Image (spheres, helix red, strand yellow):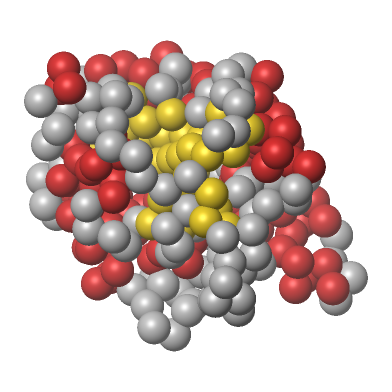
């Protein structure tokens, strides 16, 4: 099936909340197992998978800032939390025999490899899942921006933003039942409309390097698989004109 893939190599961006259970906080092993199974399903198609995961289930720097915390300190705490999530997801993947490597932008050799671009690519070529932790290794940059940067570094064909909704809407569909779902947006439309696709730095990086962004529902059983095989799923953000 590999020759039918539209996107042979993907960078999957997960929010930290994807690992939290009904309580919305922490790491739920059941959720980690569910995500691991979904990743295993797409690995079976032959796609190369790299992952960047956020930390919203463990730490939200915004709350620290509201109480006067130094921004850099809050950001470094968030980076460390992403490594915790990466280790949890690695464990879930390896328990179903998916060989996985965690690489961290902040060196912590006892628990993860240092992020080295060529080594990450080599792992992907060998069929391993690579989870890229600690963001960019620098404060003031989100995990969205880290995902865009790493996607370009590993020559990913698409950056997939996995969410809990079907794509990008013109307003919050949980609040507005008449919210309109976009099937396609240009980078500039996403920025100018201030749509919650990714932050503007991440979108600008993708725009400058012509890397498409695909926003879809991680929890819809077939969406991720269908998208890799070229079916129209979710919202595609690229340089093309809107219909």
Q: Is residue 173 visible?
A: yes
Q: Is 79 on the left or on the right of 133, as rendered?
A: right
| Front residue of this view, candidates 17 and 194 | 194
Quadrant of the rendered structure where residue 177 is?
Answer: bottom right
Q: Which residue is drawn at 29% across and 60% down?
A: 220
Residue 101 screen position, x and y as percent: 31, 37
Number of marks in the image?
0
Q: Is residue 59 above or below residue 168?
A: below
| Front residue of this view, candidates 170 and 200 | 170
Outermost residue on the right side: it is 68
Outermost residue on the bottom side: it is 23
Quadrant of the rendered structure where residue 109 is?
Answer: top left
Q: Which residue is drawn at 59% across and 38% down?
A: 185
The C terminus sits in image quarter: top right
The N terminus sits in image quarter: top left
Residue 39 screen position, x and y as percent: 24, 47
Q: Can residue 111 be seen in this view?
A: no
Q: Residue at x 61, y 17 (%)?
A: 209
Q: In this view, does 188 lie above or below 39?
A: above
| Front residue of this view, candidates 107 and 13 | 13
Q: In this view, does 211 lie above or below 167?
A: above
Q: Is 165 on the left or on the right of 68, as rendered?
A: left
Q: Is 200 on the left or on the right of 116, as rendered?
A: right
Residue 81 screen position, x and y as percent: 54, 58
Q: Is residue 32 above or below residue 242?
A: below
Outermost residue on the front side: it is 243
């Amino acid at each position: 099936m590999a020759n039918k893939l539209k996107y042979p190599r993907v960078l999957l961006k997960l929010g930290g909340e994807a690992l939290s259970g009904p309580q919305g906080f922490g790491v739920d092993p059941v959720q980690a197992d569910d995500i691991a199974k979904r990743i295993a399903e797409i690995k079976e198609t032959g796609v190369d998978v790299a992952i960047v995961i956020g930390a919203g289930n463990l730490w939200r720097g915004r709350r620290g800032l509201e109480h006067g915390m130094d921004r850099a300190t809050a950001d470094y705490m968030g980076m460390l939390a992403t490594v915790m999530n990466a280790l949890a997801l690695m464990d879930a993947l390896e328990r179903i025999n998916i060989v996985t490597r965690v690489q961290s932008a902040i060196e912590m050799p006892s628990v993860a490899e240092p992020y080295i671009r060529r080594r990450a690519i080599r792992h992907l070529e060998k069929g391993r899942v690579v989870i890229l932790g600690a963001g960019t290794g620098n404060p003031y940059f989100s995990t969205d921006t880290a995902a865009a940067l790493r996607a370009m570094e590993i020559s990913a064909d698409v950056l997939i933003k996995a969410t809990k909704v079907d794509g990008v809407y013109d307003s919050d569909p949980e609040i507005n039942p008449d919210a309109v779902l976009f099937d396609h947006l240009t980078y500039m439309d996403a920025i100018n409309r201030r749509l919650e696709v990714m932050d503007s730095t991440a979108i600008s990086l993708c725009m400058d390097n012509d890397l498409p962004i695909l926003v879809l529902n991680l929890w819809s059983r077939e969406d991720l698989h269908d998208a890799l095989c070229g079916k129209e799923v979710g919202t595609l953000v690229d340089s093309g004109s809107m219909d």
